[in-house]
Image (tube, rainbow, N blue to C red):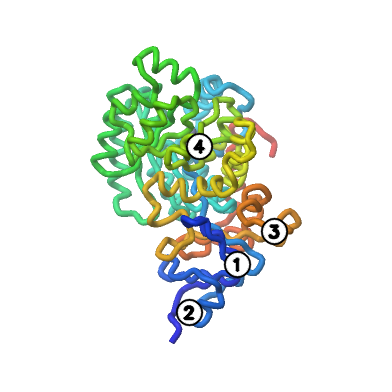
Amino acid sequence: MPEHIDLLISECLAVTVDDNHSVIEKAGIAINNGKIVALDKIENLAQSYKAKRTISAKNKMAIPGLINAHTHAAMVYFRGLADDLPLKEWLENHIWPAEAQYVNAEFIRKAVKLAALEMLKSGTTTFCDMYFLPGVAVESLEEMKIKAILGVPLLDFPTPVSRSSEEGLKNARKLIESLKGHDRFIPAVMPHSPYTCSAKLLKQAAEMSKEYNIPLQIHLSEEKWENEKIISEKGMSSVAYLNELTVLSERTTAAHVNWISNEDVEILKKTKTGVIHNPQSNMKLATGICPVPELLKAGINVGLGTDGAASNNDLDMFGEVQTAAMLHKIAKKDPTVIDAKEALWMATRGGAKAFGLDQEIGSLEVNKKADIVLLDMDKPHLIPLYDAHSQLVYSAKSSDVDTVIIDGNVVVENGCLLICDEEEILNEARIFSRKLKGVPF
Ligand SMILES: [Zn+2]
């Protein structure tokens, strides 16, 4: 008797991102109760399962849902507001003033919808977000069905939503309590950086992450001056400084990590800190190059992130994967560095491992959550197909995303979002941009 299941994806080319980087041709993926219950050649599965719905995925490639491991989602409303500037000037003269003027609950509610729409349509199923009012963001994200790790950015100075670091910590605790046990949202503690947080605040954040056993994410050693400042003030590197304050642990992910020494790599390895690589943001702001080949060699979990759309200028993980694969080749003058498998691994498995979510997401494997992206391979730029990993990393584009499945539910089909009105989300963004700059479109 065949087993009854919710969904069967048949005849896809499955790029599993399992430990062996297995690729299965004419694969079937059986899904029930939100999880993958079987994955094999379709001829081995067809008789065993009777599905409520079957998706015929001939000429489609199946990959794990992508994990955007560091972003500031609502900043999509500041996309293109100020470009071609150094980080400090960009932040202090453009982004922070715009945030002070415009960020409020209504802004967050609308902007995260645009961000989630962009991410879902480009194959991202989970993202890690450091931005204001995450409690408000979840109201919109509930509707969008995307998964998220969310935290309040903690800073020493007043922000658009809190007057002091104490208030920030209070808000963080409130968020953690409100998201306890939520199946799609994970609360996190997010001290902004070693140069915007006092030692006291960094310690308090670390204690909170330990108390609740939840992720902590921080910007770390993004620019050269930051590391030099910490060295001159504290007598040690940014990485060593955070280690001394017990901020680094297996719960911690550090974004950027561009300016580090071999000793810093050892500290990151010893503390099991994950690193989130943001190649496009680093290139655009010319902040530096994260030594990803060295980190991977040391066995450190490296995820990929877009960073905010104000510094990228999109939330497209396909672009990020390709950039990651290429950046390190030219940086090392060695075309063998960061191959296609490693680049895809960072965008899926690496992110999952960095957040301690590897048991649930990051690969197409039995017992994992059915977070699956199907790409339409019937495109001129994807034919012929000799190597699935190469095709994905060097040829595929986010516009090839056809279907997105989260926890076994189809949320994008034929490239369109099924769960809410796309046009309304786009219109709200246009209305905001006119308010901000009087842009006539
Ligand atoms: Zn960032």
SS assignment at label 2: strand
What's the residue type where badge 4 is placed?
Answer: His
Per the model, the C-alpha gap separating discs 3 and 4 is 28 Å
- The C terminus appears in which quarter of the rendering? top right
Please name the residue that numbered disc 4 is placed on.
Answer: 277
The residue at the far right in this view is 380
What is the crowding at mark 4: few (fewer than 14 residues within 10 Å), some, or many (at least 20)? many
Please tell me whether residue 284 is drawn above or below residue 118 in the rendered image.
Answer: above
Please tell me whether residue 371 is drawn above or below residue 167 in the rendered image.
Answer: below
Please name the residue that numbered disc 2 is placed on.
Answer: 49
Please name the residue that numbered disc 1 is placed on.
Answer: 25
> Residue 385 shows which numbered tag?
3
Circles 2 and 4, Cβ within 8 Å, touching? The answer is no
The residue at the far bottom in this view is 1
Q: Position of residue 388 (x, y in %)?
A: 63, 57
Per the model, the C-alpha gap separating discs 1 and 3 is 12 Å
What's the residue type where badge 3 is placed?
Answer: Leu
Q: Earlier in the sequence, mark 3 or mark 4?
A: 4
Residue that appears at 30% across and 54% down: 181
Q: Is residue 391 visible?
A: yes
